Image: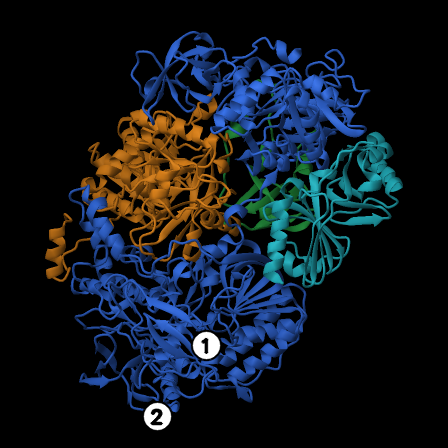
Chain colours: A blue, B orange, C green, D cyan
Amino acid sequence: MIRAAQDNRLAGGAIDRSRTIRFTFDGKSYAGHPGDTLSSALLANGVRLMGRSFKYHRPRGVLSAGSEEPNALVELRSGARQEPNTRATTAELFDGLVAKSQNRLPSLKFDAMAINDRFSNFLTAGFYYKTFMWPAAFWEKLYEPIIRKAAGLGSLSLQDDPDGYDKGFLHCDLLIIGGGPAGLAAALRAGRAGASVILADEDYIFGGRLNAETFAVGMQTGQAWAAATMAELQSLPNVRCMTRTTIVGAFDHGIYSAVERVSDHLAVTPAGKPRQILWRIYSKRALLCAGAIERPIAFENNDRPGIMLAGSMRAYANRWAVTAAKRVAIFTNNDDGHRTAADLLAKGVKVMAVIDTRADAPRIADCELLPDAQVTDTTGRLGLSYIHVRLGDGSERNIECGALGVSGGWNPNVHMTCHQRGRPVWNAEIAAFVPGESGTPGLTVAGAANGDFSTAAALRTGSDQAAAALRDLDIDAPALDLPQAEDAPINLQPFWYVQGGKGRAWLDQQNDVTVKDVTLAHQENFRSVEHLKRYTTLGMATDQGKTSNMGGLAIMAELAGKSIPEVGTTMFRPPYTPVPIGTFGGRARGKNFHPTRETPSHRFSVEHNASFVEVGNWLRAQWFTQPGEVHWRESVDREVRAVRGSVGVCDVTTLGKIDVQGTDAAGFLNKVYANGFAKLAVGKTRYGLMLREDGMAMDDGTAARLSEDHFVMTTTTANAVGVYRHLEFVRQCLFPDMDVQLISTTEAWAQYAVAGPNSRKLLQKIVDPDVDITNEGFEFMACREITVCGGLRARLFRISFSGELAYEIAVPTRYGDAMFRRIMEAGREFDVVPYGTEALGVMRIEKGHAAGSELNGTSTALNLGMGRMVSRTKDSIGSTLSQREGLNKPDALMLVGFKPVDSTHKVTAGGHLMTKGTPVDAKHDQGYVTSAAFSPSLNSSIGLGFLRDGGNRFGEILTLTTPLTGADVDVEVVSAHFVDPKGDRLRA
Amino acid sequence: MRYSGLRIIKEALTGNKGWKPAWRDPEPQPAYDFVIIGGGGHGLATAYYLASTFGKKRIAVLEKGWIGGGNVGRNTTIIRSNYLLEGNGPFYEYALKLWEGLEQELNYNAMVSQRGILNLIHTDAQRTAFTRRGNAMILNGADAEMLGVEQIRARYPFLNFNDARFPIKGGLAQHRGGTVRHDAVAWGYARGADNLGVDIIQNCEVTGFRIENGVCKGVETSRGFIGAGKVASCVAGSSSRLMAKAGMRLPIESTVLQAFVTEGLKPVLPGVITFGAGHFYCSQSDKGGLVFGGDPDGYNTYAQRGNLPVVEGVMESGMALIPALGRARVLRMWGGLMDMSMDGSPIIDRTEIEGLYFNGGWCYGGFKATPASGMCYAHLLARDIPHEYATAYRFDRFRRGYMIDEKGVGAQPNLH
Amino acid sequence: MIINHPLLGPRDAQEFTYLGDASLIDRPDWEAADAQEQFYEYAYLRDNPAGEHRELWFHEIGDRSWLVVTRNTLTHEITSVEMARDVARSKGRSK
Amino acid sequence: MHDLIPITPLGRTTAQIDRFKGLQISECPDWALASLAARRNREGDTATAAEKFLGIPLPDVATCATAGAFTAFWTGPQQWMIEAPHDRHEDLAAQLKAAVGDAASITEQTDGWCRFDLQGERCHDVLERLCNADTRVMAQGQVTRTRLEHLGCFLICRTKNSHFSVIGPRSSAGSLYHALTVAATSVV
């Protein structure tokens, strides 16, 4: 690979020439120095062509030297780390950096898609709304794929992002956004006053514009003053200085989001370290010192590589010691443009002329001055070679130059003051929008961001605004002794675009929006600023119109015969600059997306080949595979048979447990459950159905009365948190004087269901001798606090989900693992098995118990066959609205069971029920199957479901249809209680 | 003027001087037969169908700001009809059918792109729920297909199939679902309505209703009183604010739904994809931006902006589902105001005030409903009886207990 | 957002769970003649104002207090925060 | 005496300890917890009985108090958590109940939680990556509840600037531990 020399490198600059670093762009190798950005290094190597535009694929060079860059976008890095649309102007150079140009085919120099440029008259704003409509089907098949392929900019690798990201939270009295002269003065004043300060800047060195200028601050250069100030700030423990940190959003009540680019300037992110950090900054006050962004002037072919903002051209020369070309010219409507000419002359660059639109243009730089003149057109294929100038007297002139610095004035960076829908106001003196009164609460503005462009003004207002902000917090900040600095006005004379041209003058260079497009939008009545934006895509590019919006507004204002403030601006929205999704994602990656909750028997389950299932954040054992079992059904059927035949144990810790105490505990439960609890005897447990206030079933579970004023309530696993919140609402907001205290104990106790005919025999070996668990001594629905295994406190409940003789035993969680193993040991003589959620589900379906899929938020007590449970003799949540007509239809859905007529057929959950002989469509829908399983006990597939008027349709044969699979099965309507309908087993 | 490829060529060769305004900016008349409040998608569609399908005249659309500035201009552009309940299914399927013919009907390319929507499944309970839903869709005449993991992997190989916290176990696809260029919907209906003589009046805010003994005679506006035979509220997002001026309280709360778009990227996502274990759905616009969103912020607001917790939650979900998104950059985030109704379903009905009609409560299902909402509302306005597909969208369903609660979360709007 | 908890001072709203209009405290009397109508309005109808809104927030990741927050729905400015239990009592709710 | 062997929240028989430069993260399983909530109109009785039992008054909002074996910290209005060494106070709830009688509701919380202690000068740098509590201004004895890795945790400042306890839900001990160590690696 050939290596270009740094021909356009100038003297001086803030780069470290002692080190040379290598990088490649489109496969070609170049050299640069630490301190370079990709764009400064490319310019140093004489590369002006860096990208292609979005629509016409026009050649593009760098326009700016900052994050507002619309043109010089590259694919940075390679492989899984490829970053599309990376601004070459902010990408710090590192050894081995690899960059590729994008949105071109096949190469940057020759882009076949540039054919679009020839047809620009056909591809005007919004042309696609007017065609591609015939025939309809062709849109997806033909037109759209072509458009999509041509559109877009860079490409994602589509490989998993290998880098890590982190998040954090910071707190401060004063957040200072931007580390230029205003920000530094503010930080100095606030820091010396002892306030806790965060000073953040998106750049990798502090100083802002001072790094790009040559004038002095006090007795030293601007850079030296900035460095000295930083040295002091960094020595203050109460000041946190953050470089490479962009404040991207202003959110409610002083919360700002910031992105710190920790390792983007390194070849690779160090292991275990984040690539970027998203900071959430909680500030009492904030001060915006974000400076201003220069705006271009529109003229014909103003988009050629080499044409850039004058202030950026100056920054490249002063800070990075590069020029885009040996011969340059300046086109300006204000004094600031002349500074560029002066600085470049001082660096030995040939400045061909300063073209100034003002008749009274001052002579500032020692080069040819063309007052009352305009650049009308340019030439040069892949880069600027000539500019065409119209002089005041109407005569024309061609000037040869490889670069043109354009200055149309500066726009204060008001972004952050508009994130809460504050509107900027027009300042005629600088012909720009400045922050309005209705800005972001707690945020004040200083320096160029407020329209105070001179360095002296920036220092002064930064210091003053910091003091004012701290005064709100009762912190007194003594005045600073500020250094002398330039204080010249820019003497701008508004000038937006050069008239009279036949060709195209670009406003939005990335999206290819020209003056003509704005004119067309006006002609078609897309005149509101939002219509203009959306119809022409002006300002919708990756730079969000930072350099282009004002020009568009000015032209629309002129066409509409309005003033610019009358036309108004579009809404500024976060983020200030684009933020990787990974950064907002932080540590939540892969398995760590959400926390995992493990049950007390987790270790045992892992050791015994359990398959796990996610239930909320819980991991529960679904079944335990034994040697020889290949299909999960084998394991589940075995577990069910073992429980029904002898005994099994299942971890049910995940069910919510809420401790309810107090002299009004019983009365409280009476309010939250639809059925009565006041008369529940101590030592007894009762099933409870909880309704929402709208009368729908909310949750169900049991409440065990351990003593007169102490209950333990269980909830379903899924609703544990919601039910607790609901109980606190009822307690605090509805019945504030009830004496009741609540606390969750879900995780404090490891709770196991021991179920099956031999469960009592097994538990006999676990509970201590003095505990009577005979059928008489501990009957169905009994509960008691006991001791087990020689004195360990435990709780025993005789409740059954499986329909078998069953108990639930609870011990402190730390002993849960040992207890599970102890039960397995003690049960060996009964061939005890551990069983999972699948077997549990099969057995509850066999028994006709409702669960999550029945308690689906749209079922009533009536639907669930518990209509009579809703007491009408007391007030309880939901009882009144449960009496509404719509919840008590005579043909209401009822929970019933289903069996396939042909036992080899399968009942599918989610299938819909159709009366025989009626059309199979939504109108004739009779209900649906909520849960289904293969029942080893009945040796048949069975299901539960809701059926219209189900209670009166036992024995009827229905069609269970599953259009998704095309399967239709005849099923018989049966009682939901497939097994032991009388309940003899659980009372045995 | 009629749009066509030929017209584009003709105009191109004559310097594009001949393009006419897409709609006029008329001065308001003293009175109309129909005054539709709200120049959003639904309002403009209602006006269009009133004039076209129902042949009505003297129609005005009053817009507080610029047309299409509400939710039709700030949504995630998705269309689908994957609904479960009988009150919703037929309505949204009708909407989808209208979308399919929209561009030819309007002679405006709104880029209706039926590239499919996929709802991912992560648990067995979800599979059951989606099976029931998919079956209901087919029974309602919509299309649905249950996809297995391998089918999904084939189309979306970059989803997290390796170390997902909530593994993908399948998905319910509706191939006729997709996206539409949202702004173009408002502009297309506006242009169509304007061609049929509808007055579209921008920058005209309704400040009150003139109600005389129980009958609505017209509206007071920032541009004076405008009389009306029938007044139709169509301002989802601000329904409560407007109807309060008529003394009504609604079963609605307003909240903000945030949405996001990345920088332009070469094609990545072929269709619309919805994460089933987190709050994230995503598609890619023709311009190349990934357009995505999640859940509403959840507190009552009219601020059209949200806060960080939801922003982070959405993107955490995005990274959990598509780890390759890490290096795509979010370009812009915004918020739209949602009329969150008490059961998550809309209302298209008469009010107790004669001559005053209501359309709202769309939650975040409003965009996909636009054509059907316009057609059904126009039907109600023209004939005073509900359209067959909108009979369930009554005010009194809450009093009588006939809620249409797809999510089953009850009378808590921010959960729908 | 930041909610200034009466006991704990400023707390990130992310620690809270939002319910809705504070009128949910005013649960009707189940024995009233028109109880069903009252409950319908209580459960379903809202003022949903653009401006000052009294609303219920639960300090889920905190002290488990329900709060009544007065917040402007246009600006999100919070002007007062009270313990919901005190508000309920002041409205005459008891057992 | 029973012979069931307890395991730590991280599922082992011995507590996990990780050392980083300037920071130690240790799992602390040997503590018993019980919640104490005053009953309605019995706030005074509760305070008196609790002070007698603890040897110190119940702490004020968002603070904790330590005397001898006991530490009490505020968890909500008229609600506290009492912490004591597990070996001598395994049945802390029963002991408390005996002391307060029917003046307060007592609930065993020992195994509802897991505790990780962060010790060393890098505490703040790690915690600021994990939760929004402003630990730098937390004085000894200050307690807050905070969201850490989606989990509701108690954060107790045992010694200003150098020693914090994170008390989180036991079933998620693994996730909590992972978050702490990943953040520590990222920082130091």
**Image-quadrant location for residue A535:** bottom left
Q: Tell me residue B413's x, y (percent).
A: 49, 35
Q: In what element is the residue under mark 2? A: loop
Q: Nearer the viewer, residue A869 or A837?
A: A837
Question: Is tag 2's residue or tag 1's residue first in the polypeptide sequence?
Answer: 2
Q: In what element is the residue under mark 1? A: loop
| Residue at x-position 23% and y-position 40% | B102
Q: Tell me residue B145's x, y (percent).
A: 33, 32
Subunit bearing disc 1: A
Q: Tell me residue A149's x, y (percent).
A: 26, 54
B252 relative position to A644: left or right: left
On the same chain, marks 2 and 1? The answer is: yes
A322 relative position to A604: left or right: left
Q: Nearer the viewer, residue A269 or A285?
A: A269
| Kind of residue at badge 1 | Phe
Callout in the foreground (2, 1) = 2
Q: Which residue ends up furthest to the front in the rendered image?
A: A628
Find disc 1 in the rendering and name its residue. A453
C84 relative position to A326: left or right: right
| Kind of residue at badge 2 | Asp
| Residue at x-position 21% and y-position 62% | A113
Mark 1 neighbour density, 10 Å: few (under 14) some (14–19) many (20 or more): many
Find disc 2 in the rendering and name its residue. A366
The answer to whether residue B320 is above or below residue B11 is above
Is residue A697 among the parts visible in the rendering? no
Subunit bearing disc 2: A
Q: Tell me residue D188's x, y (percent).
A: 63, 63
The answer to whether residue D150 is above or below residue A193 is above
Residue B171: image tag: none
